[in-house]
Amino acid sequence: MKKIDIAVVDYGMGNLRSVSKALEHVAPTKTVLVTSDPEQLLKAERVVFPGQGAMPDCMRELDARGLREAVLFAAKNKPFLGICIGLQMLFEHSEEGNAAGLGLFKGEVKRFALADMHLSNGDKLKVPHMGWNQVYQSAINGLEQHALWQGIDDGARFYYVHSYYVQPADASLTAGFSEYPNRFTSAISNNNLFAVQFHPEKSASAGLQLLSNFVDWQP
Amino acid sequence: MGLAKRIIPCLDVTDGRVVKGINFLELRDAGDPVEVAKRYDEQGADELTFLDITASSDNRGLILHIIEQVASQVFIPLTVGGGVREVEDVRRLLNAGADKVSINTTAVLNPQMVADASSRFGSQCIVVAIDAKKVDNQPYQWEVFTHGGRKATGLDAVEWAKKMVALGAGELLITSMDRDGTKIGFNNPLNRAISDAVAVPIIASGGVGNLQHLVDGVKEGGADAVLAASIFHYGEYTVKQAKQYMAQHGIEVRL
């Protein structure tokens, strides 16, 4: 059986090609497998958990493929990278469709409230939050910079497209934040796990640097 | 600081080749979509839009091959439009590596298709393109046209925009048929009317002749992104120059 360096969790929601191509681009010698097989996730050295679409659909499809336990195991035991809905699903509950998440972390996934979407100059902010926004890095456990931020400027821009954001009950999970217009958590870290709201696979050089850091990460 | 306004170069593609955007003299093959896409990425383009203008249905599949190639090497968002008729077309383009699919004439002929595609793949990947023209003697100012601006629809562009968002469009691409190709600037009143009427981002298109037009498109037209073809393709300006100009005029961009 061939060694699987990186497994990308496929639960039938949208296109994972961008994620796998970006990983292959930064790690040409590694084996990247897009899979919906729980066994493969358990065997893989590291796991990427992407997601797009609506969270209730994502949770349903994840369970339909029997992937819940394998994803939770990987999230607790292997280098693990969540992306977009893959971040949101780690929490207890989402306002989107009043859906229960995996509950790995306490907290809520909330929608950008239209009432908050006004700037002092009168401009209206749009929802979804779509485009390149700055990500500010948080100090984690007294470390200067988390390993996944290495080589990336504090305040570098990443590509976002989302209408919901996570609100962790434990503020110390936050590894990065952005402003739209209020501050929201855009990255979390916990031991072997890192998860981001933006799309590193679509964020040009900053995104590729983060993926490269993940591939080399030894938590 | 917050969300940046986006600059989106638009590439016309037919039979697997880029037909506009050929002025990168130093490129080995300036008709090669991958080479052109890479060059725009290097200049700092925030996204790329590919418009499939292939006339023959025999060669329509070639765009899939192009998107596969570009998506393997260029890691910014890619939108594809032109000839998207069915939900199955959307699926094929997304699977090839497109992040968003732009729907134009079909949205008018069959609005339900927008709703179906949005509920299946998510509104984040459904862009509705609206071609609008100023009209007189109507209760509204701008009318939706289809078939490249040749067919009037009797639809009020602002009301149509609201309807498309209600059906699941995650973004709107607004092209002024009066301005397209004129180089006199975007139709800012049209864009402002739509931008103020909907919650989703709008992309302004049609009429850019200089960098001030991009600034006006954001400030006066309320555009969240600006799309341009010829000013970049024929080497008048680089995307980087455009961004520097916008930044100098107080617009937040990704530099």
Image (cartoon, grey):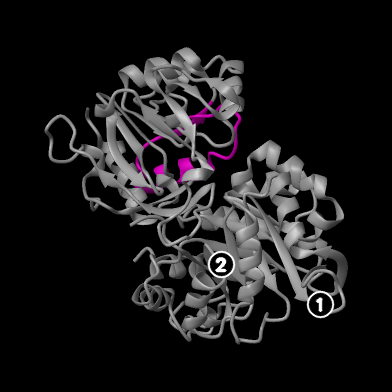
Mark 1, other Cα within 10 Å: few <14 / some 14–19 / many ≥20:
few
* Residue B177 screen position, x and y as percent: 73, 77
Q: Quadrant of the C terminus of chain B?
A: bottom left
Apparent side of residue B155 relative to residue B166 in the rendered image (left or right): right
Amino acid type at mark 1: Val
What is the spatial separation of the Cα atoms under label 1 and label 2, in whole angstroms? 37 Å
Q: Is residue A26 magenta?
A: yes
Give the residue number, with chain letter if any, for mark 1. B135
Which region shows up in magenta? A8-35
Helix, strand or loop for disc 1: loop
In the image, what residue occupies the spot 33% across and 23% down?
A169
Q: Tell me the residue that label 2 is attached to.
A: B33
> Residue A120's image quarter?
bottom left
Mark 1 vs 2, N-terminal side: 2
Whether residue A5 is visible, yes or no, is no
- Picture coordinates of residue B53, whole percent (x, y): 73, 69
Between marks 1 and 2 in the image, the one whose residue lies nearer the viewer = 1
Magenta segment includes B233? no
Image location (x, y in percent) of residue A157: 35, 54
Q: Quadrant of residue B144?
A: bottom right
Instruction: Tell me the crowding category of disc 2: few under 14, some 14 to 19, or many 20 or more residues within 10 angstroms, Cα based.
Output: many
